[in-house]
């Protein structure tokens, strides 16, 4: 159902083009309802592992939902974000360009198939379709204006990522076939025939860099700022889908199949993560356009997730995944707010904007909550997830690394709070901008309200999500011995 519903919606939006702005939210909303239903069923039956699960969806009906452990959270995140994107107004007519809604629903179908598979070959094939297809969205689907240089750069990066991913997939399949005599890329089968320590290191590097490119992890991040040079919703689509696919590759496959190599390289990955945190902050500080600043802040946040994930303990796994959920909602709120600002003011220059709170209060509140959702301080929506992540870093990497990550988090949020102050609270600039529309349309109002509610709910009622993630990542916790910091 998670795949068939958006596929049906994509076909209907092509056939009934005049109703596509209503059909897309309807079908993406149905997918979201199914995802929430599955999550509720899994929470009631938390005996999960990393190789998929069967759970009772209702009394007397047990179904194999085929979601590998932490993939449940990725399914829900994707359904939420696609639904929010389907509410977006495009262009001056209030609609996406022709075919945009169909492309969005088709992308959702591919992502649902990708996040519900535990077969590495299927994952690689689906990732190829997603990442190659995304390379054309900036030009022909989700924005009215083409960006050929950025699109070409993005394609080059994604093709490099796919080449590394295919090489690793073939090597793992060949190794399993040589030892067992059977060709299989199922996660459970591959785990039964582990690679030698040397080959694990080689395959780890292939998979890690294949995941780091769509994650926009430093130093393989340069496609993201270039993509956001020209504002448009495609940057958010690509960022969210690429980041989720890259993170799922790490959590769903690499950490499970290559434990020796993960432990060998975990300090190197943590170092890259910290370097990415401060590089992103330094670059964001120099940006005067809002969408460029958001792009570099997200590069910084990706580094924070990697450091927490490679702490290799229960709090690190659950905290990183929950924080990735918070970051995804925050990114949606920030980019969609920027998109609305551009539509209503004609610019995203922080210097040219000011005093907009009175005319756009809901956008201002959405922006503020999205920023606070990424802050690791008490009484903020993202505190519980960030607290668990920092606790894991402190226990496994020591005080120095924990202080570095916390400092980076505060600095990145400070840059966004400064942008919030300049855009919404500061005195209006001498050259007053003329708003193209005094009042928001209903999609903008509904979308902003939903984002605010989701951020508050995910942040202040995080305990059910934490229990779910502890259950779905228990296989990872058992795989790695408790790590103690060695001074």
Image (cartoon, rainbow, N blue to C red):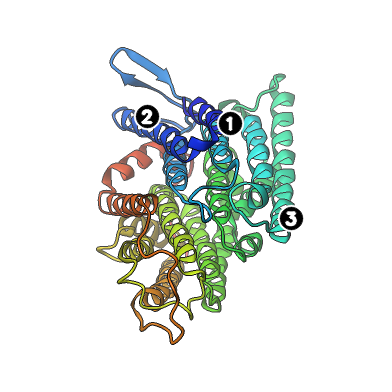
Residue 85 to residue 376: above or below: above
Please give the name of the residue rendered at 31% of the width and 12% of the height, measured from the top-left corner: 60
Q: Which mark is residue 100?
A: none
Q: Residues within 10 Å of mark 3 (few under 14, many from 20)?
A: some
- Residue placed most toward the observer, 473 or 34: 34
Residue 188, by quadrant, is top right
Q: Which mark is residue 152?
A: 3
Q: Position of residue 388 (x, y in %)?
A: 35, 55
Q: Is residue 71 visible?
A: yes
Residue 46, by quadrant, is top left
Secondary element at image label 3: helix
Q: Is residue 454 left or right of residue 15?
A: left
Q: CA distance from mark 2 to mark 3?
A: 38 Å
Q: Position of residue 311 (x, y in %)?
A: 47, 54
Residue, disc 1: 191
Q: Residues within 10 Å of mark 2 (few under 14, many from 20)?
A: many
Q: CA distance from mark 1 to mark 3?
A: 37 Å
User: Looking at the image, is mark 2 or mark 3 earlier in the sequence?
Assistant: 2
Residue 343 to residue 190: above or below: below
Please give the name of the residue rendered at 69% of the width and 36% of the height, measured from the top-left corner: 169
Secondary element at image label 2: helix
Residue 353, by quadrant, is bottom left
Q: Residues within 10 Å of mark 1 (few under 14, many from 20)?
A: some
User: Looking at the image, is mark 1 or mark 3 earlier in the sequence?
Assistant: 3
Residue, disc 2: 38
User: Looking at the image, is mark 2 or mark 1 earlier in the sequence?
Assistant: 2
Secondary element at image label 1: helix
In the image, farthest residue toward the bottom: 430
Q: Is residue 354 left or right of residue 260?
A: left
Q: Position of residue 26 (x, y in %)?
A: 41, 34
Q: Is residue 200 visible?
A: no
């Amino acid at each position: 159902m998670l795949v068939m519903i958006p596929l049906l919606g994509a076909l209907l939006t092509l056939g009934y083009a005049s109703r596509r702005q209503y059909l897309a939210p309807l079908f993406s909303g149905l997918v979201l309802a199914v995802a929430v239903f599955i999550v509720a069923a899994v929470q009631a039956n938390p005996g999960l592992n990393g190789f998929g699960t069967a759970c009772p969806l209702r009394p007397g009906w047990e179904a194999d939902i085929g979601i590998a452990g932490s993939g449940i959270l990725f399914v829900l995140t994707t359904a939420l974000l696609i639904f929010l994107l389907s509410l977006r107004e495009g262009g001056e007519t209030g609609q996406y360009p022709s075919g945009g809604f169909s492309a969005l629903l088709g992308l959702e179908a591919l992502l649902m198939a990708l996040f519900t598979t535990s077969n590495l070959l299927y994952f690689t094939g689906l990732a190829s379709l997603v990442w190659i297809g995304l390379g054309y969205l900036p030009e022909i689907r989700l924005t009215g204006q083409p960006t050929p240089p950025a699109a070409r750069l993005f394609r080059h990066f994604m093709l490099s990522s796919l080449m590394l991913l295919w090489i690793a997939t073939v090597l793992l399949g060949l190794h399993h076939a040589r030892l067992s005599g059977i060709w299989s890329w199922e996660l459970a089968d591959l785990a039964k025939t582990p690679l030698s320590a040397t080959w694990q290191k080689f395959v780890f590097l292939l998979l890690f860099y294949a995941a780091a490119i769509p994650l926009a992890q430093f130093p393989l991040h340069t496609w993201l700022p270039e993509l956001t040079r020209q504002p448009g919703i495609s940057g958010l689509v690509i960022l969210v889908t690429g980041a989720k696919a890259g993170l799922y590759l790490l959590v769903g496959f690499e950490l499970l199949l290559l434990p020796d190599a993960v432990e060998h390289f975990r300090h190197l990955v943590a170092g890259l993560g910290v370097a990415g945190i401060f590089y992103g902050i330094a670059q964001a500080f120099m940006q005067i356009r809002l969408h460029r600043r958001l792009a570099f802040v997200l590069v910084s946040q990706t580094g924070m997730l990697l450091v927490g994930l490679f702490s290799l303990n229960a709090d690190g796994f659950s905290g990183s995944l929950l924080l990735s959920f918070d970051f995804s909602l925050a990114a949606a709120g920030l980019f969609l707010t920027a998109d609305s600002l551009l539509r209503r003011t004609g610019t995203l220059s922080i210097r040219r904007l000011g005093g907009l709170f009175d005319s756009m209060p809901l956008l201002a509140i959405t922006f503020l909550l999205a920023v606070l959702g990424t802050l690791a301080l008490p009484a903020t929506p993202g505190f519980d997830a960030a607290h668990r992540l920092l606790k894991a870093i402190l226990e496994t990497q020591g005080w120095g690394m924990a202080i570095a990550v916390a400092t980076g988090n505060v600095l990145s949020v400070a840059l966004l709070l400064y942008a919030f102050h300049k855009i919404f609270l500061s005195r209006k600039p001498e050259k007053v901008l003329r708003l193209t529309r005094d009042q928001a349309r209903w999609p903008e109002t509904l979308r902003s309200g939903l984002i605010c509610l989701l951020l508050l709910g995910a942040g202040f009622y995080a305990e059910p999500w934490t229990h779910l993630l502890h259950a779905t990542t228990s296989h990872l916790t058992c795989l790695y011995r408790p790590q103690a910091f060695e001074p």
